[in-house]
Amino acid sequence: MTAMTTVLSEREWHARRDAHATRMARWVEPHQQRKAQGIKHPVLDFLFTYYSYRPARLTRWHPGPDVVLAGESASEYLDWSGYVPVPSGVTLDRAALTETRRASVSFVVGLLRATETRAPRLGCFGLHEWAMVYRAGSIRHDQPLRLGAEGTDRVVESLPIKCGHFDAFRFFTAPARPLNTLQPTREAQVDLEQPGCLHANMDLFKWAYKLAPFTPSELLADCFELASDIRALDMRASPYDLSAFGYSPVRIETAPGRAEYARQQASFAVRAAPLRRRLIELGERLLAWIAT
């Protein structure tokens, strides 16, 4: 145990654990109810299907590095991977950060550092979702298109597509790919990601859970909430009519709609910046652990 270690009393960490479970229940419980009833949600399901972190793990609280959980009930954490007993209680196990995890942690830190250094670019207007249905025989989310297929195609053809996020670009239809001003690849991800991109900011949640169980759950929850809010804008600006689910459109096919999208995109970039910094600092701490 180092001088920087924080020991949480049983009362303290129980309160934080319970607060986290309550916070996450806002999303997890409705998702589980929909799943049990076979109901799909075109906006919120994304948080549990595209992202692979299971709801049960999302509600599980972790203290983060350099924290000891005191009290008899802390022994429950010994049933989970990554924890060890110490004289004061239970804490995360540095030995769980094996050399095999170094590459993963290094990639996350390198990607986030590179993204952090760039100025936000705000001119994409969410056209990635439109490019995913351009000249397609079917639609991705089983929802009606606001402008119909032909109207949607005209929007794609009338505006420049500037998507630099590979995990969005890979879902473009074949006819839409040549229309993109960039041709992102997985290998170029570190070179292309920038802090104005909605998907790059949603992915902070992914990088948070990739570092689990070492990510403090409060940070994980902050990243998840950000992803949830961004996802709503992402789909409101899409070609789909989601009024049945209570989502009003951001009409990016119009100049006022594009201006509104850019304003919200800029706001999310500001909100994401401190979360990205916290993840970088966490990753750097973990890399230092691996090196010792």
Image (cartoon, rainbow, N blue to C red):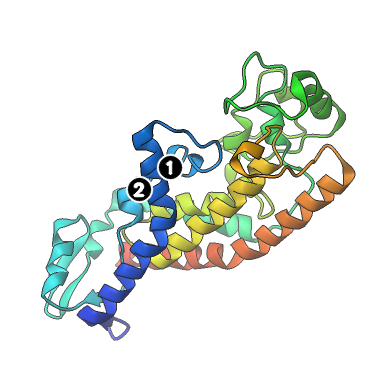
Q: Which of 98/83 is in front?
A: 83
Q: Upstream in the sequence, badge 1 or badge 2? A: 1
Nearest to the observer: residue 5 or residue 172: 172
In the rendered image, which residue does mark 1 sit on?
A: 48
Quadrant where the image shows the N terminus: bottom left
Q: Check disc 2: other Cα within 10 Å, few if <14, some if 14-19, many if 20+.
A: some
Q: Secondary structure at mark 1?
A: helix
Q: State how many labels appear.
A: 2
Q: From this view, report whether residue 96 is shown above or below residue 197.
A: below
Q: x and y percent of residue 175 in the render?
A: 72, 18
Please name whichever residue, 40 or 244, is drawn nearer the observer in this view of the structure. Answer: 244
Q: Residues within 10 Å of mark 1 (few under 14, many from 20)?
A: some
Residue drawn at x 67%, y 64% is 270
Residue visible at 61% across and 51% down?
230
Of 263 and 63, nearer the camera is 263
Q: Amino acid at mark 2?
A: Pro
User: Which residue carries the number 2 mark?
Assistant: 55
* Residue 2 higher or lower than 248, as above or below: below
Give residue 207's position: percent from left, percent from top.
46, 52
From the viewer's perspective, tell me whether residue 65 is left or right of residue 188.
left
One can see residue 67 in this view: no
Q: Residue at x 18, y 78 (%)?
A: 70
What is the secondary structure assignment of the residue under circle 2? helix
Image quarter in which the C terminus is found: bottom left
Question: CB under 8 Å between callouts 1 and 2?
Answer: yes
**Residue 131 occupies which quadrant of the picture?**
top right
